[in-house]
Amino acid sequence: MNDIDLLEIERENKTNAYLGDGENRRHSSKKSATKQLLKILVYLTGISLVVLFAFTSRVLMSEDNSIGSVFSLFSQIKHLAQTSDNLLKGEESGRINVLLLGMAGKNHDGAYLTDTIMLASVASATGELALISIPRDLVIPMEGYGFRKVNNVNAFAESKELGSGGLAVSQALSRVLDMPIDYYLRADFEGFVKIIDELGGIEVEVANALDDRRYPVEGKEEDPNYDSRFEYLRIEAGKQKMDGELALKFVRSRHAGGVEGTDFARNRRQQLVLEAVKNKTLNLRILFKPRLINNILETLREHIATNFQVWEMVKLWGIIKDTNSDKITAKVLDNSSGGLLVDAAGSDGAYILQPRSGDYAEIQYLAKNIFSNAPAEQKNEIKREYAKLEIQNGTWANGLGQRTATDLEKFGFEVVGIHNASKKNYEESLIFDLSYGEKMKSLALLKEKTGARVNLGMPDWLMAELKERNASKTDLTQPDFILIIGRDADKTQSGTENTEK
């Protein structure tokens, strides 16, 4: 069989509609006065949640935006009510971009180097949220400094003018990503720990056991006894209760064994903590604990820098308050086989990460097209089949493989590799189904979105190519489908003499 009747597939594999999580509650039966009270309470909750939400990515508010007491919030809310027609920056164009930054803070080595860099984008019309984690070792152009690691930008700016770092990083990444980043939030370690402890700790669903025998001990960085500089950190997989110190260690650990030993794994752990803080805050009756709110706000005042006004934070909360996990997309820029970055060495021999394509075009494409247009039901069907996909670019079109991967990931496919095909003259796109019909919904959607011709199994010539290519590799992931992109996928770019994926 060389092709598949999509209509027949859909008839035979039709399932019950995906049921939403039912979290959005309506209060339509409330009286007018009660509604007004609830509105004020929701605003208060919103402020706390937005700040805490940002804080889990290690972001903090400066004294020039002080919100030092609970009572001052009411005047800010009144201001919000008077300016409800005002738009957030980016809201009119449909996308609000916020840069989240984390740094060690005073009394720490590398106090202003940003350990955490994350772009949070909100679709103003739908409340969808996208998180793109940017590794600290990525090199970007910096005015007056040439190409430097992105984690240096904040430190360089702070050395010239205190308080300027957040804006400097947002402007630098705005140029790299070719999109406006109008807001920033920045946090330090101490504030992170205090907030978690004020909440009474959090529960985190740990995906993989973390085993780090070289976690640095604060204050012992120069201890003559080298072994005393480190402690042993072990966190088991499963649901774990964490106080602020343990949560900080969980998101900072950099030397764990196995899959958790990279900066990219750290970025994913930060997302787990983010979700845990959100859940804990929702479960607490925080509105009825004014002392708790006041303590949290005081911590934020001391440890957060931002260019947000409070009314802007409240309005942003109004947009994302009903956002659940189905509307959150999280990406980590990494150096995997399907990633956008590659390892390199700087002029001084230091480890750096560079864009795989040689410029930032592929990263820009990902950032600009991060929001998924796939219906939740369709996306969850593909995720349930756990469809793994390898993409090969069989054309001369620059970046076509990566752009195709970005588009297909929105539908729930896991792209396990992006490569150049052995030849560049494929006229039509081809799908090789290595699941032999076991993942029919994924196959049907893949054919629909690419228009490719389907083949069951793998021909001898392709098997021989893969065997040669993977001869020295030990950590291979077997794909369910191999997609070879032909000229029919992007005729406008065919004929260019560029072999990039």
Image (spheres, grey):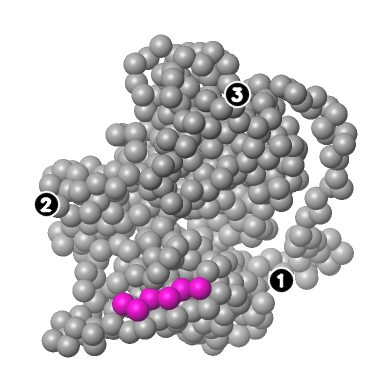
* Residue linked to disc 2: 348
Marks 3/1: CA–CA distance: 60 Å
Q: Is residue 195 visible?
A: no
Find the magenta span and give its range.
Answer: 209-214
* Residue linked to disc 3: 430
Q: Amino acid at mark 1?
A: Leu
Foreground of the two, 156 or 388: 388
**Left or right of residue 169, residue 7 in this image:** right
Q: Residue 31: image x %, image y %?
A: 84, 67
* Residue linked to disc 1: 37
Q: Residue 347: image x %, image y %?
A: 12, 47
Q: Residue 353: image x %, image y %?
A: 29, 48
Compared with 296, 269 (above or below) is above
- Frontmost of labels 3 and 1 is 3
Q: Residue 418: image x %, image y %?
A: 46, 36
Q: Secondary structure at mark 2?
A: loop
Q: Secondary structure at mark 3?
A: strand
Compared with 244, 262 (above or below) is above
**Left or right of residue 367, residue 74 in this image:** right
Within 10 Å of disc 3 (Cα), the crowding (few <14, some 14-19, many 20+) is many
